[in-house]
């Protein structure tokens, strides 16, 4: 994992390593499989005392299978570094916020806010534009980077957060965190998503 990894990514990687080590230390109790096999074909007239032993053996086997399955899921579950493969990528939403009060009701070019192509580039650079949005626009959001270029809005609020968003007409770009007052949870972008700008 590179030095640019998010703190949450490092914690997730550490937990995966610890779970993998714990999973490798799990040992099958002695004689468990023999007890399970003997439970599959019990004698017709098994004594009453043997039935509880068979039940315990089956329960122990079920617990062991569940523990292994849980460990396997923990290792392969989606994390911040794993883009979602089986669900819609843009599954969250954010609302555009313009700090300039007089511009909020207007949809003019002068009141438009820029979506950037690169959250690590200069926001106002001529080539760093992916589209325009206006106050109140509801945008589909895929993920967020937390250490992009710092942007300060007209009211003096600064942020290094950038949201990868898609407009209703299909334009994709990065919305600076100061251009929204987001209160919904948005997952952290994977390293590939953060590098491969729209």
Image (spheres, grey):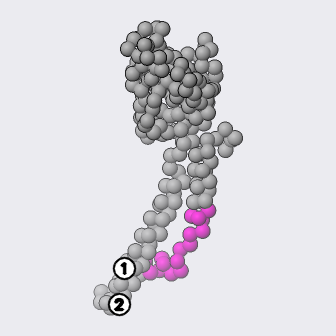
Which of the 4 image quadrants contains residue 119? Answer: top right
In the rendered view of the protein, which quadrant contains the C terminus?
top right
The tally of labels here is 2
Crowding around mark 1 (Cα neighbors within 10 Å: few <14, some 14 to 19, many 20+) is: some
Q: Is mark 2 on a helix, strand or loop?
A: loop
Magenta segment: 21-36
Rendered image quadrant of residue 108: top left
Q: Where is residue 156 in the image (x, y as percent from the top left)?
A: 56, 23
Provide the secondary structure element on which disc 1 rests.
helix
The image quadrant that residue 196 belongs to is top right
> Which mark is drawn over residue 55?
1
Q: In which quarter of the image is the N terminus?
A: top right
- Percent of width and height locating residue 87: 42, 38
Who's the residue at 32% across and 91% down the image? 47
Vertical position of residue 64 compared to residue 107: above or below: below
In percent of the image, x 60 and y 68: which residue is there? Answer: 25
On screen, 17 above or below 123? below
Which of 102 and 34 lies nearest the eye of the viewer?
Answer: 102
């Amino acid at each position: 994992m590179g030095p640019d990894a998010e703190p949450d990514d490092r914690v997730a990687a550490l937990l995966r390593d610890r779970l993998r080590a714990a999973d490798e230390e799990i040992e099958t109790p002695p004689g468990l499989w023999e007890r399970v096999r003997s439970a599959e074909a019990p004698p017709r007239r098994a004594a009453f005392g043997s039935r509880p032993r068979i039940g315990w053996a089956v329960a122990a086997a079920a617990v062991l299978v569940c523990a292994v399955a849980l460990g396997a899921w923990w290792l392969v579950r989606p994390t911040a570094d794993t883009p979602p493969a089986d669900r819609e990528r843009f599954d969250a939403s954010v609302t555009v916020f313009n700090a300039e009060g007089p511009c909020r009701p207007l949809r003019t070019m002068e009141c438009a806010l820029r979506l950037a192509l690169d959250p690590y580039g200069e926001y106002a650079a001529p080539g760093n534009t992916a589209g325009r949005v206006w106050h109140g626009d509801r945008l589909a959001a895929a993920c967020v980077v937390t250490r992009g270029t710092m942007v300060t809005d007209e009211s003096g609020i600064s942020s290094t957060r950038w949201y990868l968003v898609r407009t209703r007409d299909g334009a994709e770009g990065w919305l600076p965190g100061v251009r929204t007052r987001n209160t919904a949870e948005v997952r952290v972008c994977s390293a590939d998503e953060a590098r491969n700008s729209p």
